[in-house]
Amino acid sequence: MEAQGERLLQELLAQEKKLVSKVDEARAKAKAMVDKANEEAAATLEAARARAEALAQTEAEAGRKEEESVKQTVLASAREAAETLAAKVAANRDAAAAMVLEKILP
C-alpha cells in the first residue's frame, strides 16, 4: 500500500512538473507574441509618422506654390495698374504743360 501511495505521489509530481513546464512554455509564447506585437505596433507607428510627415511636407510645398502664384498674380496686377497710371500721368503731363504754356505765352 505504501508503495502504491509512493507511486501515485511520483505520478502526481510528474504531472505537476509537466503542467508547470506547459505553463512556462505558454508564458514564453505569450511573451514572444506580446514582444512581436509591440515591435509591429512600433513599426506601424513609425510608418504612420513618416507618412504624416511626408504629407505635411507635400501640403506645405503646395501651400508655398499657391502663395507664390497668388503673389505673382497680385504683382502682375499691380505692375499693370502702375503702368496704366504712368501712361495717364505722361499723357496728362503733356496736356498740363501745353495748358501752362498757353497761359504763359498767349
Image (tube, rainbow, N blue to C red):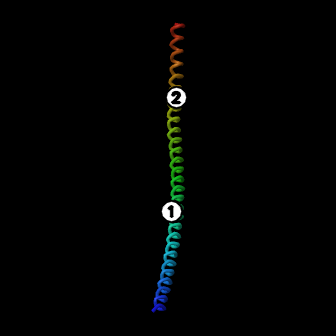
Residue position for label 1: 41
Residue at the far front in the pictured view: 2
Q: Is residue 98 above or below residue 51?
A: above
Q: Position of residue 86 (x, y in %)?
A: 53, 25
Q: Label 1 to label 2, Cα distance in Å?
A: 60 Å
The residue that appears at 54% across and 53% down in the rendered structure is 54
Q: Looking at this view, is 59 or 43 the one in front? A: 43
Q: Is residue 15 above or below residue 64?
A: below
Q: Position of residue 33 (x, y in %)?
A: 51, 70
Look at the numbered discs 1 and 2 and tell me whether their residues touch, using CB distance below 8 Å. Answer: no
How crowded pointer 2 is (Cα within 10 Å; few <14, some 14-19, many 20+) is rated as few
At label 2, the amino acid type is: Ala
At label 1, the amino acid type is: Ala
Image quarter hosting the N terminus: bottom left
Q: Looking at this view, is 100 or 9 the one in front? A: 9
The residue that appears at 50% across and 40% down in the rendered structure is 70
Q: Looking at this view, is 8 or 53 the one in front? A: 8
Q: Position of residue 99 (x, y in %)?
A: 50, 13
Name the element at disc 2: helix
Name the element at disc 1: helix
Residue position for label 2: 82
